[in-house]
Amino acid sequence: MRLDQARKDLYRRLAKEQGYKSRAAFKLIEANEKYGFIRQGDRVLDLGSAPGGWLQVASKLVGPEGRVVGVDLQAVHLKDKNVSSIVGDVNSPEVLEKALGLLGRRADVVLSDLAPSVSGVWELDNSRQADLTLRALELSASLLKGGGCAFLKLFEGERSPEVRAALKRSFKIVRPVKPAASRSASSELYYYCEGWHGDLRP
Ligand SMILES: C[S@@+](CC[C@H](N)C(=O)[O-])C[C@H]1O[C@@H](n2cnc3c(N)ncnc32)[C@H](O)[C@@H]1O
């Protein structure tokens, strides 16, 4: 636990030094160093994007020809020219319309770091987080291009087999990722997914 805290402090300090809005930035950097799924010119949709660490990382990776669209209940304040933000609930139909408009075409990559505000009741938080990840998958059906990639957070718990099965039905390749910047005591795990084929049937 002490080691976990030390690691958390380290990434928080690094984020501050390197101008990132959150230590979460390092989770995406690490995953992209391994899988290289965000490329120059890509369109990226980032669900649960505040305070904006992943948006900053994706913005650099896609470069001036690319586009990054974030969605969050909270406003994000970034000046990067290739980043747009939508303040809204991922469950609302308007968000889908707005995201498609801002992306200009289907995304090459969908990111989701969606997490509910914690109630303290573990089972409830876990189940809400699973619903958010399933919503990211549902949005991918309308917003991700065929063959596209995703990097999604999932709290490990009772509902993870259900969500994992949905991911495996929808993507050709699904790999669990536990980034160094994610506390080992935390139940959060990420999934790198490749080869979207949009099959959401049960
Ligand atoms: C762990 S934070 C994301 C951190 C972000 N990836 C970064 O790099 O800064 C999770 C986010 O999910 C957002 N969120 C939770 N439920 C949501 C919903 N229904 N619609 C949109 N955003 C939501 C929260 O507001 C919160 O900002």
Image (cartoon, grey):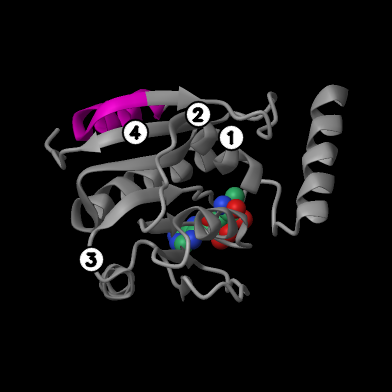
- Callout 4: CB less than 8 Å from ligand 1: no
Where in the figure is residue 90, as x and y percent of width and height? 38, 62
Q: Is residue 131 visible?
A: yes
The residues tagged by marks 4 and 3 sit, at their Cα atoms, a distance apart of 20 Å
Whether tag 4 and tag 3 are in contact, CB under 8 A, the answer is no
Label located before the other in sequence (4 or 1): 1
Residue at image mark 4: 193
Q: Nearer the viewer, residue 154 or 101?
A: 101
The residues tagged by marks 2 and 4 sit, at their Cα atoms, a distance apart of 13 Å
Residue at image mark 3: 105
The residues tagged by marks 3 and 1 sit, at their Cα atoms, a distance apart of 27 Å
Q: Which residues are magenta?
A: 159-174
Please name the amino acid that badge 3 sits on: Arg
- Give neighbour class at mark 1: few <14, some 14-19, many 20+ (Cα, 10 Å): some
* Left or right of 8 on screen, residue 188: left
Residue pictured at 40% horizontal, 40% vertical: 37
